Image: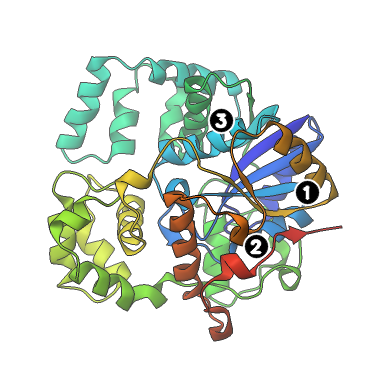
């Protein structure tokens, strides 16, 4: 059996290893679909995508594919949709596994089914709550509080798990959903429990120069060329881009709605950094993650027309011997072109062009000046582990 995992591995830690180990108790192989240069919280990944793919391969993944930036830098629904459709397109995936706080697949499936049949009263309630200043996640949770049990929608991994299941339902996928209860720690937990903690805690420790060796199941020296990548190195580029963009251009950017472009442009004239800009723009209605994604999307020219529920290709970041066999099998069934060498992909693809821009811009965030050159997608081969 082949199981897919949709991931970010930002940074790969003991919890991720635990998930893969649990999956392999009931599956033969793991295919990870991983965010590339930027991540869903609206940030540059802590290091390059090949280093993170190698960490996953060292810790049990067999094949690592890139989740295109148009999904990675997007809301939960679109993030999930891109990941599931990537797995669907391979044509060989039997199940998809994901973490959740509740750990109960039946409850998650029931919640997904209720949300897929959302009536106008619920839709109107969500819009009403948002008009009162609630963020979308908060409005969603409140609108469904009498219909979906145990506060499932109040916890972020549950929400993403439900979106994966909904994407499976919408595509009539044969892939079976599996959930692994999060071990010892919760999303964005700031505590360490038996060498388990959140990726956000580990990233903070790295930034502070603290030792993280007990919290990751590999040696950093075996994977990372440089870290941490820091989005603040893009401050001038971001502010310059926004100051040179008009309202029409900003309104075309992914996730921009309801006149937010005017607030973005005005705020860009009053601040000089990415963090200060996002603080100025944020409100109760818009989560900080959404604002950060929008600003980075503007920098990357990620416009709304680039998004499509169906990926335009499959991009290979790394594999082991088992992964090579999985890839050979997938190529016989896959409905999309499979890219192992970027230079060989000649098709016109706005999604691929966005990924190239994302890699080039993310490279500028490296702490190592020697690693900031462009064109890495055309210079870097997939990771191969023997």
Crowding around mark 3 (Cα neighbors within 10 Å: few <14, some 14 to 19, many 20+) is some
Q: Residue at 46% across / 50% down in the picture?
A: 348
Q: Image quadrant for the C terminus?
A: bottom right
* Discs 2, 1 touching: Cβ within 8 Å: no
Q: Quadrant of residue 178?
A: top right
Q: Earlier in the sequence, mark 2 or mark 1?
A: 2
Helix or strand or loop: what does disc 1 sit on? Answer: loop
Relative to 121, 49 lies left or right: right
Q: x and y percent of residue 5 in the render? A: 64, 40
Q: Earlier in the sequence, mark 3 or mark 1?
A: 1
For residue 113, above or below residue 336: above
Residue at the image point whose x is 73% and y is 34% from the top: 332
Which residue is at 19% across, 70% downward?
244
Q: In the rendered picture of this protein, how many numbered marks are placed on residues?
A: 3
Dot 1 crowding, Cα within 10 Å, few <14, some 14–19, many 20+ = many
Is residue 239 visible in the rendered image? The answer is yes
The kind of secondary structure element at disc 3 is loop
Q: Nearer the viewer, residue 298 or 9?
A: 298
Q: Can residue 184 be seen here?
A: no
Marks 2/1: CA distance?
16 Å
For marks 2 and 1, give the one nearer the viewer: 2
Q: Which mark is residue 50?
A: 2
- Residue 217 position, x and y percent, is 75, 58
Residue that label 3 marks: 102
Q: How far from the left and from the top, in percent, is residue 26?
A: 79, 29
Residue closest to the far front: 346
Q: Farthest residue toward the bottom? A: 369
Which residue corresponds to the image point at 27% horizontal and 19% vertical from the top-left? Answer: 122
**Residue identifier under label 1:** 60
């Amino acid at each position: 059996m082949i199981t897919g995992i949709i991931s970010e591995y930002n940074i790969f830690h003991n919890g991720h290893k635990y998930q893969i180990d649990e999956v392999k108790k009931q599956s033969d192989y793991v295919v990870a679909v991983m965010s590339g240069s930027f991540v869903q919280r609206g940030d540059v990944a802590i290091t390059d995508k090949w280093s993170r793919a190698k960490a996953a391969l060292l810790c049990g993944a067999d094949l690592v594919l890139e989740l295109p930036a148009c999904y990675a830098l997007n809301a939960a629904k679109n993030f999930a949709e891109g990941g599931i459709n990537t797995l669907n397109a391979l044509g060989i995936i039997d199940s998809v596994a994901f973490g959740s706080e509740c750990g109960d697949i039946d409850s998650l499936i029931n919640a997904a089914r209720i949300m897929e049949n959302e009536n106008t009263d619920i839709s109107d309630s969500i819009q009403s709550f948002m008009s009162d200043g609630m963020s979308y996640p908060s409005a969603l949770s409140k609108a469904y509080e009498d219909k979906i049990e145990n506060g499932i929608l109040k916890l972020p991994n549950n929400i993403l798990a439900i979106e994966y299941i909904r994407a499976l339902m919408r595509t009539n996928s044969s892939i079976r959903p599996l959930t692994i209860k999060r071990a010892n720690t919760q999303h964005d937990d700031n505590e360490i429990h038996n060498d388990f903690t959140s990726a956000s805690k580990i990233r903070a420790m790295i930034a502070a120069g603290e030792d993280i060796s007990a919290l990751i199941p590999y040696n950093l020296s075996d994977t990372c060329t440089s870290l941490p990548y820091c989005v603040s190195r893009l401050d001038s580029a971001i502010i310059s881009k926004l100051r040179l963009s008009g309202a029409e251009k900003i309104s075309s950017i992914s996730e921009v709605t309801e006149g937010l472009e005017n607030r973005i442009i005005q705020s860009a004239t009053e601040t000089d950094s990415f963090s200060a800009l996002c603080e100025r723009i944020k409100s109760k209605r818009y989560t900080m993650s959404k604002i950060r994604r929008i600003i980075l999307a503007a920098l990357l020219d990620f416009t709304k027309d680039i998004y499509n529920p169906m990926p335009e290709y499959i991009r290979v970041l790394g594999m082991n011997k088992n992964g090579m066999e999985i890839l050979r099998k997938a190529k016989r069934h896959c409905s999309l072109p499979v890219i192992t060498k970027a230079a060989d992909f000649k098709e016109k693809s706005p999604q691929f062009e966005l990924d190239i821009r994302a890699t080039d811009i993310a490279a500028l965030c490296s702490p190592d000046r020697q690693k900031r050159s462009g064109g890495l997608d055309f210079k870097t081969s997939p990771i191969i582990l023997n």
